Image (spheres, rainbow, N blue to C red):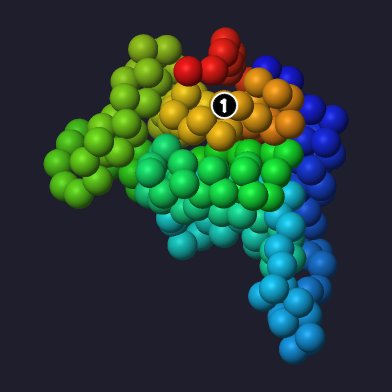
Amino acid sequence: MTLTAQAQEVLDDLLEGNRRFREGQPQTYSYSPQDLLAISRNQAPRAAIIACADSRVSPELIFDQPLGSIFASRVPGNVASDSAKWMLDIAVNEFHVPLVMVMGHTGCLAIGQLLDGDKGGAGGLHRFSVLSAVYRAKARRPDDLYLEAVEQNVQQTVEHLARDSYALRGSLLEGTTSIVGAVYEMETGLVYTLEPSLDVYGRF
């Protein structure tokens, strides 16, 4: 599935912001009391991002974006949680965002725990969703199993969201919203996108 022209424009802007971030040249955003009042009354986000809850993975900072530009859901392992799906319903139905991004990251503790064989603890089905991505990665017999697991977990979340979010699925079919997977390299600050592997065949 290719990105729409509007989604590509938003993605290019995010990646340009990421370049500023990693080169240590972010834009300076300051907010007067009047600015904050205006933001409190209205928002027009251009992208919805599902990212990990990791304290080092903040989409607004990584993409050097101002308040009000990103509608975000953060959950361990950037999985297709109920809260992420609810966020997408709002982002797509209310704000008509042209771009949805699922962003995994290197150094992900959720991936690391399951690669180490930890299958217990909190998280329930979401923990097993990450485990499923680990199995997908192992089946590919990659040179770097950890990185492959991170990428497969992103791709799997993209698939789950497109399948389970009626709002997103409808917008994908109508061509008003696009979805992309990405990985944030914590060691370098770089965000790179993954080759799309999603096919949406029809509504439910």
The location of residue 1, given as percent across then percent down, is: 68, 17
Is residue 197 shown above or below 170?
above
> Residue 61 lies in what quarter of the image?
bottom right
The residue nearer to you, when weighing 189 against 158, is 158
Residue at (16%, 47%) from the top-left corner? 121
The residue nearer to you, when weighing 186 against 120, is 120
The location of residue 16, given as percent across then percent down, is: 81, 48
Q: Is residue 184 left or right of residue 128?
A: right
Q: Given the current orientation, which residue lies at the most extreme left position?
A: 120
Q: Which residue is mark 1?
A: 169
Q: Is residue 108 visible?
A: no
Label 1 Cα neighbours within 10 Å, binned few <14 / some 14-19 / many ≥20: many
Identity, as a three-letter code, of the amino acid under mark 1: Arg
Residue at (44%, 56%) from the top-left corner? 54
The residue nearer to you, when weighing 30 against 166, is 166
The location of residue 191, given as percent across then percent down, is: 66, 43
Residue at (83%, 36%) from the top-left corner? 6
